[in-house]
């Protein structure tokens, strides 16, 4: 066990020696670290959770355990591990537990450490850590920091450009980066190696499917699970119901589809957006729209005969809203009017609708403009909201219609 802990110390020190882009999180790191609450950093695999934790603790005396390590899991003995940590990291102030959800009954052990007064920073790639495991054993004992792939602003930072302050001579490069980000996403590992996007994300997608879904849930019918995942990534931004999916893919039961869809959300691969309705029962019955955590997965895995730039832009806007802290359970929805007109995003604050956002890649055609404007205006009337935005690839203007003022903005300014 001591050898494992020593080897992980070398791993920690090597990781600390690398250069990193500081993420735009708005977090008060000192306040977080001074809190006795558990600091829980969640999000998909490979988005930089461990890096964020290491940067938070870089100048501190901290111990490190990485649970993405089979020898550690095979030789697990909680008391022995704690003794070895004291030997290898004498007098440590903080304990970083990386990908802790891989340890059986991890929540009970973490709760025990919390009672012992350990100042804990935890990373995990599973939404279920919050929905059930953290919620039951560790209620009121943790603060959550959710991480996603690079935002567009962070992608520009990596490329040493200021998204919001481009000089005239940088405009062409800015447009190229905007298109690159929309097509290939923001996974940190590939922002500097764009030719690797498809092969890297293809492998990562399969790894998440196997490690975080099939293995964790003992899924026997891997083929059905994989077929569902490929169907979802190929039909991103479309409203889908479990009944339709069951019929389309030949599943034996609708309940299996629902179960598999939940499994695929847990590792943050897919998000499901509900149709807004004041009546919860009707909201739960309506089809949900499917979004992918990163546009790069579409490039790597989707079965498509042509590139759908409109849906890629819509998915990008959805992920940007997630970066801003909107939540598919309480504050973010789509809406369809009584006449079947649709607005892509309904943003709620408290009990009222604060903003409607429509996404249209290219609105230069009068017919397209009429369709998008009529839809958002009709939905605005039903939802009693006057803060209206249409996000496009590069258009910027204002449209007046039916007593409403609509801001048309390029995605770079959104």
Image (spheres, rainbow, N blue to C red):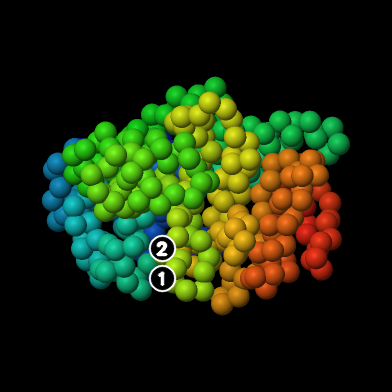
Q: Secondary structure at mark 1?
A: helix
Residue 334 image-quadrant placement: bottom right
- Mark 1 Cα-neighbour bin, 10 Å: few <14, some 14–19, many ≥20: few
Residue that badge 1 annotates: 281
Q: Which residue occupies the foreground of this view, 48 or 265?
A: 265
Residue 232 lies, with reference to residue 330, above or below; the image says: above
Residue ID at (38%, 29%): 203
- Mark 2 Cα-neighbour bin, 10 Å: few <14, some 14–19, many ≥20: few
Residue ID at (35%, 51%): 243
Q: Report whether residue 1 is seen.
A: no
Residue 127 image-quadrant placement: bottom left
| x then y, percent, for residue 176 | 71, 31
Q: Secondary structure at mark 2?
A: helix
Residue ID at (84%, 56%): 398
User: How many discs mark residues in the rendered view?
Assistant: 2
Residue furthest toward the top? 195
Residue 312 lies, with reference to residue 242, above or below; the image says: above
Residue that badge 2 annotates: 285
Residue furthest toward the right? 168
Q: Which residue occupies the foreground of this view, 379 or 6?
A: 379
Q: Are marks 2 and 1 in contact (CB under 8 Å)?
A: yes
């Amino acid at each position: 066990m001591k050898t494992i802990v020593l080897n992980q110390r070398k791993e920690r020190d090597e990781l600390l020696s690398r250069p990193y882009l500081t993420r735009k999180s708005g977090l008060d790191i000192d306040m977080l670290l001074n809190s006795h609450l558990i600091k829980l950093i969640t999000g998909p695999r490979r988005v930089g959770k461990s890096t964020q934790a290491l940067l938070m603790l870089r100048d501190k005396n901290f111990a490190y355990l990485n649970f993405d390590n089979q020898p550690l899991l095979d030789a697990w003995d909680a008391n022995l591990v704690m003794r070895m940590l004291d030997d290898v990291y004498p007098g440590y102030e903080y304990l970083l537990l990386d990908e802790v959800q891989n340890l059986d009954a991890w929540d009970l052990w973490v709760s025990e450490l919390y009672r012992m007064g350990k100042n804990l920073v935890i990373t995990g790639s599973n939404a279920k850590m919050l929905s059930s495991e953290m919620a039951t054993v560790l209620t009121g004992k943790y603060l959550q920091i959710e991480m996603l792939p690079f935002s567009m602003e962070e992608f520009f930072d990596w490329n040493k450009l200021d998204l919001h302050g481009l000089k005239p001579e940088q405009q062409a490069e800015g447009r190229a980066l905007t298109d690159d980000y929309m097509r290939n996403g923001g996974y940190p590992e590939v922002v500097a190696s764009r030719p690797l996007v498809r092969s890297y994300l293809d492998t990562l997608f399969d790894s998440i499917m196997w490690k975080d879904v099939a293995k964790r849930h003992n899924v026997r019918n891997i083929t059905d699970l994989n077929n569902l995942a490929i169907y979802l990534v190929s039909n991103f931004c479309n409203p889908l119901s479990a009944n339709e999916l069951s019929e389309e893919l030949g599943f034996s039961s609708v309940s299996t589809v629902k179960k598999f869809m939940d499994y695929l959300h847990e590792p943050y691969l897919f998000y499901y957006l509900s149709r807004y309705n004041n009546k919860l029962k009707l909201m739960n019955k309506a089809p949900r729209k499917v979004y992918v955590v990163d546009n790069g997965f579409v490039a790597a895995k989707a079965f498509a005969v042509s590139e759908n730039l409109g849906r890629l832009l819509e998915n990008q806007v959805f992920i940007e809203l997630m970066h801003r802290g909107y939540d598919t359970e309480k504050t973010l929805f789509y809406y369809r009017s009584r006449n079947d007109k649709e607005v892509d995003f309904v943003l709620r604050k408290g009990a009222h609708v604060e903003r409607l956002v429509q996404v249209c890649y290219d609105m230069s055609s009068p017919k397209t403009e009429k369709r998008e404007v009529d839809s958002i205006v009709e939905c605005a009337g039903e939802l009693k909201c006057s803060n209206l935005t249409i996000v496009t690839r590069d258009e910027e203007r204002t449209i007046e219609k039916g007593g409403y003022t609509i801001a048309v903005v390029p995605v770079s300014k959104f």
